[in-house]
Amino acid sequence: MSGASSANADFSPPTAPTATASANTNIALIKYWGKVDEALAIPATSSLSLTLEGTRTTTSVSFDGGAGTADSVTINGSSPTGAELARVSRFLDLVRSRSGVCAPATVISRASVPLAAGLASSAAGFAALAAAASHAAGMNLDDRALSQLARRGSGSATRSVFGGLVLWNAGHDDASSYAEPVACAMDLAMVVVVLSERYKPISSTRAMRATMVTSPLFPAWVEASEEDLQVALEAVQAGDLERLGEVVEGNALGMHAAMMAARPGIVYWLPQTIATLHAIRAMREEGLPVWATIDAGPNVKALTEGARAEQVAAALRDRLPGTTVSVRRPGGGVRIEEGS
Ligand code: PMV
């Protein structure tokens, strides 16, 4: 880690407070893909997401001196090293520089959903870390400021600060790039189809950079995405699930088309990803309200109506034997846990 020296560790208070916070993960309906400013994580486009219930990561932070000269980080019982540890420490350095706290930290984090569930873990992880670390450092951030801070850990974490439907305004600098909740009277749910538990062949940060720099389709995707977001917001306001579903599926396919056109092309899909897309189309033809979205991996999430979610999940299990299918309903935002 870079910011906390052993000299600083000597100044840590004898009983540094521990703060514990939790956050759910979220799935984008209108995607974020590409940063115009990598250091500040300012995205190329605004995005819209649904925070999912039962997907909390719970994280405790104390600036208590950590491992002496460095932060001590435990995630799901094991200690990350290399780039993963450096990413957490860089984020803690930001909190230290803003709060004036100097000591290395002890961070203990546990995800309630295993990685194998096919749900992005960094959104929940960095939203919970931002809340717990800022609280432990005595910063009193409102939700907007927390969302701006979480953005520096992972783009999608910006949105996990809030529950339900969430809009991340791309903005143009640190102050103008933040998320906010969007009123939604619709009964929405996501059905998650796990096709592979493997890690990504290429990280989203690297894949975004490659798409922006080398894909001739990237500018077209950015332009389409702005319009897609307006259509999605109008559909939400009108309670029009079909219009929302169509633009959600189109936006995700457009994002993947842009990355496939990068040089060399980035292909996160597996044969079963395409089989799932076809299954979803066939189910729509039979009258089920279901539309696909896909993130930086092979797994498919299906947007549907809450009241039909179990029926959609059963139909997907029937058509895709051997896959793991689960229903996820809208969930709440960041929570500071009792006793912090
Ligand atoms: O937050 P990151 O760097 O993991 O990027 C997430 C990108 C997508 O999941 C593909 C899209 C999104 O908006 O969440």
Image (cartoon, grey):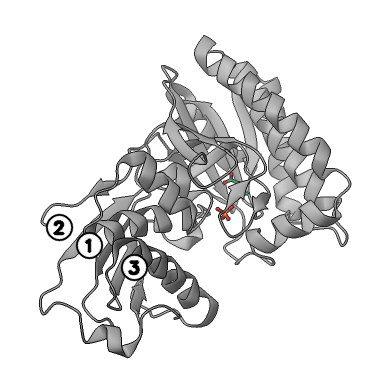
Q: In which quarter of the image is the C terminus?
A: bottom left
Q: Mark 3 points at which residue?
A: 96
Q: Mark 2 points at which residue?
A: 340
* Image location (x, y in percent) of residue 142: 30, 41
Q: In terms of sequence position, does the residue under pointer 3 or pointer 1 come before the other?
A: 3
Q: Relative to 223, say whether 23 is above or below.
A: below
Q: In which quarter of the image is the N terminus?
A: bottom left
Q: Would you identify the image quadrant in which residue 164 lies?
A: top left
Closer to the camera in the image, 253 or 189: 253
Residue type at numbered disc 1: Ala
Asked if the residues shown at circle 3 and circle 2 are in contact, with their CB atoms under 8 angstroms apart, the answer is: no
Closer to the camera in the image, 286 or 101: 101
Q: Mark 1 points at which residue?
A: 136
Mark in the foreground, 2 or 1? 1
| Cα separation between marks 3 and 2 | 19 Å
Residue type at numbered disc 3: Arg
Q: In terms of sequence position, does the residue under pointer 2 or pointer 1 come before the other?
A: 1
* Image location (x, y in percent) of residue 243: 64, 17
Label 1 element class: helix
Asked if the residues shown at circle 2 and circle 1 are in contact, with their CB atoms under 8 angstroms apart, the answer is: yes
Label 2 element class: loop
Q: In terms of sequence position, does the residue under pointer 3 or pointer 2 come before the other?
A: 3
| Cα separation between marks 2 and 1 | 8 Å
Mark in the foreground, 3 or 1? 3
Residue type at numbered disc 2: Ser
Closer to the camera in the image, 52 or 287: 52
